[in-house]
């Protein structure tokens, strides 16, 4: 190949490479800018969500199966749906654990929203108490004048019904755990098998198939502020 031909070939190759590199660089810049914009948008969204959570009166620190989380209880009981089906994975991760702190948080949140719920549904006063039977059915005082109206309102507002059922269930678990605490403490301090056997015998009623559990009641003032008792004793 002549020097002129070689020079021409190198010049064309260099020009083509430069053109290709320039194109790739432009595409990379555009892609980088696009990614940066997407990241910035996500950061803004997350930041907005964080600020919304921080400023919400309905956000509580809750113990869940996925760890301690700041949850907005005003939306927590209306979970998002995927194709009409609640995400089981999301539900499992956000499962509330039976703890006194969780019961206290739910009690506080319900007390803050139940008066407005009653007013919005034209219910003049709250029942003296609510209970849930073994089948999960709501039990109200026989003389409560707005029983049908309240049941209808809860049917139309499943998030409110879920929150009441949840606080009742968690309170029941917590009360049972608290009832067995003396057994656990004494069993942990047993010096030998003989002492442990005596402790197990002492608390054998805890392991009986016919064991009775503490009766949970959700008590309300007339305006709708709630407190919780287990066997007529305040829980939190």
Image (spheres, rainbow, N blue to C red):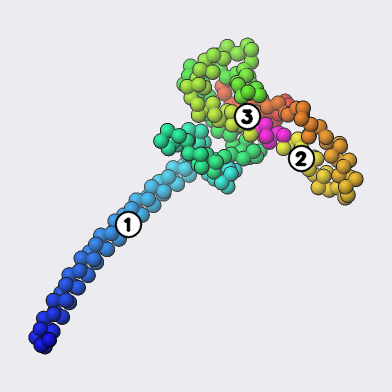
In the rendered view, tell whether residue 84 sits above or below residue 19: above
Q: Judge whether residue 205 can be spotted in this image.
A: yes
What number of labels is visible? 3
Query: Gap between marks 3 and 1, in whole Å?
Result: 47 Å
Residue 141, how many percent across, how many down? 64, 15
Q: Where does label 2 land, which residue?
A: 181
Could you tell which of marks 1 and 2 lies nearer the N-terminus?
Answer: 1
Does residue 140 appear to the left or right of 52 in the view shown?
right
Residue at left offset 77%, top offset 27%:
210
User: What stretch of residues is rendered in magenta?
Assistant: 171-176
Query: Gap between marks 1 and 2, in whole Å?
Result: 55 Å
Query: As rendered, which of 208 and 9 lies closer to the eye?
Result: 9
Main SS, magenta residues? helix
Q: Residue furthest front?
A: 1
Label 2 CA crowd tier, 10 Å (few <14, some 14–19, many 20+): few
Q: Where does label 1 land, which residue?
A: 35
In the rendered view, tell whether residue 1 sits above or below residue 18: below
Q: Quadrant of residue 174?
A: top right
Label 1 CA crowd tier, 10 Å (few <14, some 14–19, many 20+): few
Q: Residue furthest bottom?
A: 3
Secondary element under disc 2, as helix, strand or loop, is helix
Q: Where does label 3 land, which residue?
A: 168
Secondary element under disc 3, as helix, strand or loop, is helix
Residue at left offset 60%, top offset 18%:
127
Could you tell which of marks 3 and 1 lies nearer the N-terminus?
Answer: 1
Q: Which labelled disc corresponds to residue 113?
A: none
Q: Is residue 92 magenta?
A: no
Label 3 CA crowd tier, 10 Å (few <14, some 14–19, many 20+): many
Secondary element under disc 1, as helix, strand or loop, is helix
Residue 219, how many percent across, how many down? 64, 24
């Amino acid at each position: 190949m002549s020097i002129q031909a070689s020079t021409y070939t190198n010049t064309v190759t260099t020009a083509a490479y430069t053109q290709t590199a320039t194109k790739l660089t432009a595409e990379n810049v555009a892609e980088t800018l696009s990614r940066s914009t997407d990241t910035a948008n996500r950061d803004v969204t997350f930041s907005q969500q964080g600020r919304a959570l921080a400023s919400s009166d309905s956000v509580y620190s809750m113990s869940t199966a996925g760890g301690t989380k700041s949850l907005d209880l005003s939306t927590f009981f209306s979970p998002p749906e995927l194709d009409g089906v609640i995400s089981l994975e999301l539900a499992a991760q956000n499962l509330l654990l039976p703890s006194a702190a969780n019961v206290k948080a739910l009690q506080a949140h319900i007390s803050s929203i139940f008066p407005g719920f009653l007013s919005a549904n034209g219910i003049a006063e709250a029942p003296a108490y609510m209970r849930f039977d073994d089948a999960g059915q709501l039990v109200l005082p026989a003389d409560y004048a707005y029983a049908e109206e309240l049941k209808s309102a809860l049917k139309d507002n499943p998030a409110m019904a879920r929150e009441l059922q949840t606080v009742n269930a968690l309170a029941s678990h917590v009360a049972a755990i608290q009832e067995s605490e003396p057994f656990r403490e004494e069993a942990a301090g047993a010096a030998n098998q003989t002492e442990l056997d005596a402790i197990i015998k002492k608390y054998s009623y805890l392991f009986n198939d016919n064991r009775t559990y503490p009766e949970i009641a959700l008590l309300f003032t007339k305006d709708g502020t709630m407190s919780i008792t287990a066997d007529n004793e305040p829980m939190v």
